Image (cartoon, grey):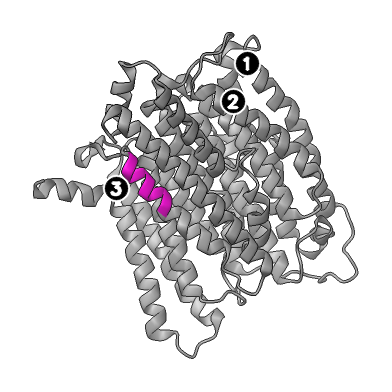
Amino acid sequence: MNALSYAELARAFLPEINLTVGALFVLGFDLATGRGKTTAQRLRPAVFFGMIAIIAALYATISAGVGGPVFGGIFSLDALTLATRLGVLLLAWLTLGLLNDVVALRHPAEYVAIILLATAGFTLMAGAQQLLVAFLALELASLALYILAGWDKTSPQSAEAALKYFLFGAMSAAFLLFGFSLLYGVTGSIDLPIIAMQISVTSMSPLVVVALAMIIVAFGYKAAAAPFHLWAPDAYQGAPASSAALIASASKLAGFVFFLRLLWPGLGFTAGRISELPLVVGWAPMVALLALASLLVGNFGALAQSNVRRLLAYSAIAHAGAMLLGVIAAGRAGPGPVFYYAATYGLATVGCFGVVAIVERAGRCQNLTDLAGLHKRSPLLAGCLAVFVLSLAGVPPLAGFFGKFSVFASALKLSGLHGPVGWLAFAAIALSAVGLYYYLLILKQALVAAPQENAATKIEVPVQAGLALLIAGTLIVLLGLFPSKILQLFS
């Protein structure tokens, strides 16, 4: 390939280059200047340079703009890639903002560097048009997240979370790679456009059906969809709050976009039929079963939780079920509803874990009762938490409402209430009432209940963390007031 091709490749991957260079600089700076300093003193420059690297990646993403395939079609600079890159970079930037003054964090430079490398994996997943590139990007992000989940070596729960996350992730990677190898064997290519063309002229062979099943299993794990969700409650509970925030937000956004691109442009001819009876075998009926199971397990499982983090984990399972509806409907409605839902859900989840992290600094934040009297202990945290939780519950005019509305509306447009997708959308709408109940349990403690006797009277909010929470809350309000600003990017 000529020099122009490599220049094009470097320009397309400039955000990932900035993130990688930033990770190396953070490590080098800490190695050169961090000896003899406290953890807090080492953390501040690491976070600062990490945030600078993400800002540089944001600028490079905007500069690259929207184009077509690059470097022989292995990567696509389309609107979905641009929006997803901006989304995951913003979520990673907010995650770093919540790390300020976390004095108990060990090896802060390494922690920040791994967050940057995970983000590079997310941004690569956003536009991958080749199975090999997509798998490498997915594993780069996944390996970084396994490490982040088990970062707190003093906590047995963190070690358990990392082990379960790693074991489930390794099995998921095996299923995904096996499915990819079968697709390659059937089509003779690892490029999504060629795979789509080959499948369009051949019938659904048994090998293709097996490949689809393998890919859907891996998809279910990455989305924390039932029955592949068992790792999520333990990972959310045991991982450091910032790690759990990244796992629940940027990871889910990048994962859904990656599989959305794989299932529709690449494997759209194998979707089958689910809009009306009789059903036709394909990946769409499989995804519908995952969606129904996730909605039931997530919503009813959350009702039994008294631990804040486990409640957020089961909430994530329920939201995954709703987003899977958008995946089914994306063939007609496009990727806009799924992206909007995943992005706004990510903002609210980062905010919730940010509040949890700050309350933990003042004492303890495990059970719902640990949030009691938050409105008196910190009005700022209570107000931000209200915005985040109400958005997750889908209360208008916050962004979470329009995320659910756009996904449910796109699903109902397929066949109304006269087909399986319509019935599934109706079930999702009904189960949202269950979700509203357990979200109100959080707000009852934070906004109504009196503080516990052993709780800190006042909670000091670090300036940088408070700013990150205010930015996330403001974006949720603005995106709820102007949802078309995001949805029109894909029209």
- Image point 21% across, 48% down: which residue? 9
Q: Picture quarter containing residue 140?
A: bottom left
Which residue type carries mark 2?
A: Ala
Q: CA distance from mark 1 to mark 2?
A: 9 Å
Above/below status of 361 relative to 419:
below
The percent coordinates of residue 411 (x first, y second) are 58, 20
Q: Where is residue 58? Give x, y as percent.
A: 38, 52
Mark 1–mark 2 CB contact (< 8 Å): yes
Q: Which of these two is toward me, 172 or 464?
A: 172
The image quadrant that residue 412 belongs to is: top right
* Label 3 crowd bin: few (<14), some (14–19), many (20+), radius 10 Å: few
Q: Horizontal placement of 165 versus 391: left or right?
A: left
Q: Position of residue 475 (x, y in %)?
A: 56, 46
Image quarter in which the C terminus is found: top left
- The amino acid at mark 3 is Ser
Q: Nearer the viewer, residue 170 or 131?
A: 170
Looking at the image, is mark 1 or mark 3 earlier in the sequence? 3
Residue 300 appearing in the image: yes
The residue lying furthest to the front in this view is 206
Q: Which mark is residue 379?
A: none
Q: Which residues are magenta?
A: 131-139
| Residue 372 in the image, given as x and y percentages of width and height | 84, 59
- Mark 1, Cα crowd under 10 Å, few <14 / some 14-19 / many 20+, is many
| The quadrant where residue 51 appears | bottom left
Name the secondary structure under disc 3: helix
Per the image, is 136 magenta?
A: yes
Residue 420's tag is: 1
Circles 1 and 3: CB atoms closer than 8 Å: no
Mark seen at residue 63: 3
Query: What kind of residue is marked 1?
Result: Pro
Q: Which mark is residue 288?
A: 2
Q: In the rendered picture of this protein, how many numbered marks are placed on residues?
A: 3
